[in-house]
Amino acid sequence: MVETVLGPVDASKLGKTLIHEHFFFGYPGFQGDMTLGTFDFEEKKQQGIAVAKLMQQQGVETVVDPTPNECGRHVGLLKAVAEATGMNIICATGFYYEGEGATPYFKFRQQLGTAEAEIYEMFMEEITNGIEGTGIKPGVIKLASSKDVITDYEQMFFRAAVKAHKETGIVLLTHTQEGTMGPEQAKLLIEEGATPEKIVIGHMCGTTDVTQHLSTLEQGVYLGLDRFGLHGIVGAPMDEARKTVLAGLIGQGYGKRLLLSHDTVNVWWGREPKLPEPLQEMLQNWRPNHLFIHILPELLEKGVLTEEQVEEMFYHNIADLFE
């Protein structure tokens, strides 16, 4: 069974799943701009419903929304969207990487010597009893590291997460910054005692360096190629490069360890960002149906992928991960 915002679901019945999409997200600090970035529950709910229906039109039945605790995670809204649409939504407990997370709270407690134990306690409370008194439980722990380094601050979360994982079996899902530190993340988690088959190293399509992909996959973890459509920011490669990486890894027999998604932010907290026209053009396909409309049909037509391999990545791998 895996926890969703509406309660436990049999892992074998999750169906077609996107491993990494954000219904609602805000960079820490958005709370200080809410006079102009107003909050209307019903409005946000309707926006979330529209996003869910967009994915359901492509046969998606389950979405993992790994929004970190400090980036606008709102399980009440996710529950309302799930109730209205029938979508399975798996939410997270966890924190963002040091460069863009809300660090002062736990950095202060790190100075007191209590932070890591308190992070573990928070993980366990949310996993076993629910988030903020709602009874809604996360299905994954979200972890993140910086570009080219896992900082001392970030390592606290990795260690605390593995401790909670060993007690509960919860899946560990990570953010790599620009596809760096994937092998190091996997090594750290496994050395701390995590089960490789319950780890997803995310955003690895942020690099085209196949040695990084192979060094990560060889440790027995899942690889998230989960930023299709995201171009022009955070050093993201174009989709042509991502397709080449995907084809290469499939060709080397790693289809059973790959998970695909877009990492879309569909509704922003605070004021909606106003993107310059060149960036708007680059991000025109950064939508949670892009894989199914553009990427997969092309790869299937060219014979790069088979229908069986697509089904493996969107159905079987997900079921195995959450079993």
Image: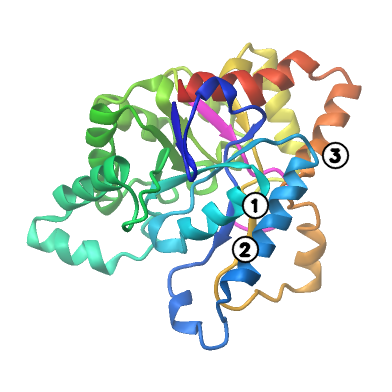
Image side of residue 276 versus residue 111, left or right: right
Amino acid type for the residue under numbered disc 1: Ala
Alpha carbon distance from label 1 to label 2: 9 Å
Tell me: residue 191, above or below residue 160.
above
In terms of sequence position, does the residue under pointer 1 or pointer 3 come before the other?
1
Q: Residue at x 58, y 37 (%)?
A: 19
Q: Nearer the viewer, mark 1 or mark 2?
A: 1
Q: Is residue 192 visible?
A: no
Is residue 290 inside the magenta stretch? no
Amino acid type for the residue under numbered disc 3: His
The residue range painted magenta reads 222-235
Q: Residue at x 37, y 33 (%)?
A: 184
In terms of sequence position, does the residue under pointer 1 or pointer 2 come before the other?
2
Question: Which residue is labeled 1 in the image?
Answer: 84
Image side of residue 302 versus residue 152, left or right: right
Alpha carbon distance from label 1 to label 3: 28 Å
- Helix, strand or loop: magenta stretch: loop
Question: Residue 257 falls in which quadrant of the image?
Answer: top right
**What SS does tag 2 mark?**
helix
Q: Which mark is residue 294?
A: 3
Tell me if mark 2 has few (under 14), some (14-19) or many (20+) residues whose alpha carbon lies within 10 angstroms of its own. Answer: many
Q: Nearer the viewer, mark 3 or mark 2?
A: 2
Q: Position of residue 321 (x, y in %)?
A: 48, 23
Q: Residue at x 63, y 35 (%)?
A: 208
Q: Nearer the viewer, mark 1 or mark 3?
A: 1
Q: Position of residue 49 (x, y in %)?
A: 68, 56
**Frontmost residue, 288 versus 50:** 50
Amino acid type for the residue under numbered disc 2: Lys
**Frontmost residue, 184 versus 71:** 71
Q: Which mark is residue 45?
A: 2
Q: Position of residue 236 (x, y in %)?
A: 64, 49
